Image (spheres, helix red, strand yellow):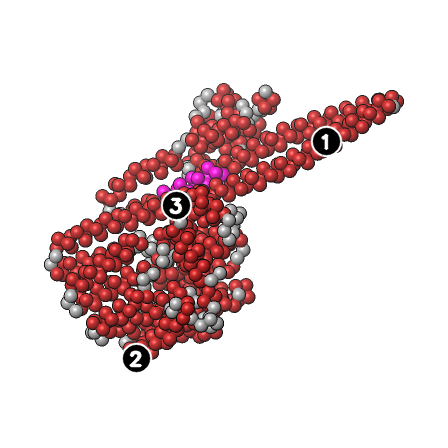
Amino acid sequence: MTTHIRYFFIIILTLSGLNRADPDQNQIAGSDGEKLVDSLQVMKFSYPRESIQFAYEILEFYPERRPNRTIASVFSILGEIFMHKSLPVQALEYFMEAEREFDEIGRLKGFPWLMVNMGNVYFQEGLMEEARIKYIEAYDVFSNYYFEINKNNSLAGQAVTQNNLGLIEQGMNNFANSLGHFQQGLEVRRELGKPLDLAHSYLSIGQLYLEWGKLDSSVEYFNRADSISLIYKLPDDEQSESQNWEEEINPQLSLRYAGKSQEYRGELQISLSQPAKAFIYYKRAQEYYKSLPRDYIQLMALNAESFMLLNEPDSALWYLQKGLIKAAGQGLIGQELSLLEKKKELLDTIGDYGSANAAADRIIVLKERQMSVQMNDMLKNLELKTALRAKQQDLNREKARVQRNLMMTIFGFAILVLLVLNFRSRHIASQQEKRIMNQEKQTANRQRRIAEQESKMTRTELNAKERELSSMSAYIVQKNDLLHTLKKEVDYHINLLSKEEQKTFRSLRSQLKSTIDADSDWKEFEKKFASVYPGLLETLVDNYPELTSSDLKICSYLRMNQNTKEMAELTGLSVRALESRRYRLRKKLNLDRSIDLVTFLHSIDISKDVQA
């Protein structure tokens, strides 16, 4: 696939109505998983909003049975997108989902990169030690499982982890240690032989020297980066025909690195108190960042700072406004808030308090929206997990149905064989009267076997109902666990708010609690329990009228041989509370200490009800 065809495919995916369920379902169901992941990889930072929608639809409609590599990769990409949207909780959650998926399919290749991404989340949140631990763990896997991961992937991983460890040291002003990590990563990338990776290392070292105050060295490394990235940003028709663009070059990266070089050169001019010259470099970087919204927005803030140094607040406000428009259009709330803070500070400085107050109001609105987006993302993720779990259950049920049909076919064939044998034996009996007695005995034996088979089938049906009842118990446990987890997450985030803001979420808390305490699951469970153990609950109620609905629930779970911990998960009660209820139940049943409660429930004869 050529470069033009590939990007045409991406644009079609992005613009052809991703919100229409039926066409997308057919499109995704008929697509190769690797191509879907490649498209997401290219789209994820340029079109984050569309990428999230596309990823959700892949998760919903991708037909291959889980676990599979495509689903794991999509979870990982979602984590990266939310990380860049400054939503660390959602990012870590998707990375952990990807880790579980890779673990189930036994693919080591995805694990170290997930460790790197988790480290990036910690780094973004300022948790340097946690980030360092993840990077070191990833480096060990890349280094020690060389043959399982493959050479290029292993070398790329080693270079990235060393570079990230260098960033940690740089953030702690340990410049010498940082340079050591950057140079080690550079040596690995030289062995790997990918030009743009070398450009990335040169930029990292140049930016380190800039912060270190070694300006001549920083310019030298920026020039090295330009010698690579400026070649690969040219249009296709200016490239050498021998250059394999798709395999070697990512045009987005080449543009970004070319822009970063100009951006850092602008920062160098700022350090030399030359804001006018800095603006020239920022203007060049802007040309490279047209399709890179995050970098473009950050550059608008740098432009504003340079004009503030030139004492031109109107120009500074103009560039801040450009960045705000871009951030709002891409849904990058974190960057929009950062620009609004700068705008408010600038307006206060120049004495435009009315506009400053309007900016402050906008900040409050955005923070509320950010909280709403985070909550919506959490609920969307919960809904998605529930849908995926239901889909997996449907697949399991379909598999069981096929197995049942196969068994019924075999059984039908066996019956057919028996019928043929029966016809032949009757024919022989009509021809040979002396074998009539033997034939009658054979008929009696067959009738006995049929009766035994019918009895066996009755028991099989009962076993199937018992399995269905156990599955429902497991479903109730999973649902309660999910609701408790969601409630804890909601409580945690609400507790971070002020008391006044917490009042807004009282209804949500009440709704979650009422859902957990609802009896709808018990009513459905009671119906299925009655079909498996008919007459048991009625017998208990008739003989022990003091029993309450809660007592009958405990009796049901004990009759199914559920232990105290499992019962606690089903009822939402603590283990201690269940022990107290069991003690009161024994008293209501007038059981002697020598009689086990479970044994007593199993001893209740319901055979008459079953026969009825």
Give the residue type that dot 2 points to.
Answer: Asp
Q: Position of residue 529 (x, y in %)?
A: 52, 29
Q: Which residue is mark 2?
A: 216
Query: Does 456 sit above or below residue 330?
Result: above
Span shown in magenta:
474-487
Q: Which residue is mark 1?
A: 416
Q: Position of residue 142 (x, y in %)?
A: 49, 65
Q: Which residue is mark 3?
A: 19
Give the label on residue 580, or none. none
The residue mark sitting in front, 1 or 3, is: 3
Q: Tell me: 570 left or right of 315.
A: right
Determine the residue positioned at 42% across, 71% down: 239
The residues tagged by marks 2 and 1 sit, at their Cα atoms, a distance apart of 92 Å
Query: Does 263 sit above or below residue 579?
Result: below
What quarter of the picture does the C terminus occupy?
top right
Judged from the image, the secondary structure of the residue bearing numbered disc 2 is helix
Determine the residue positioned at 52% across, 22% down: 539
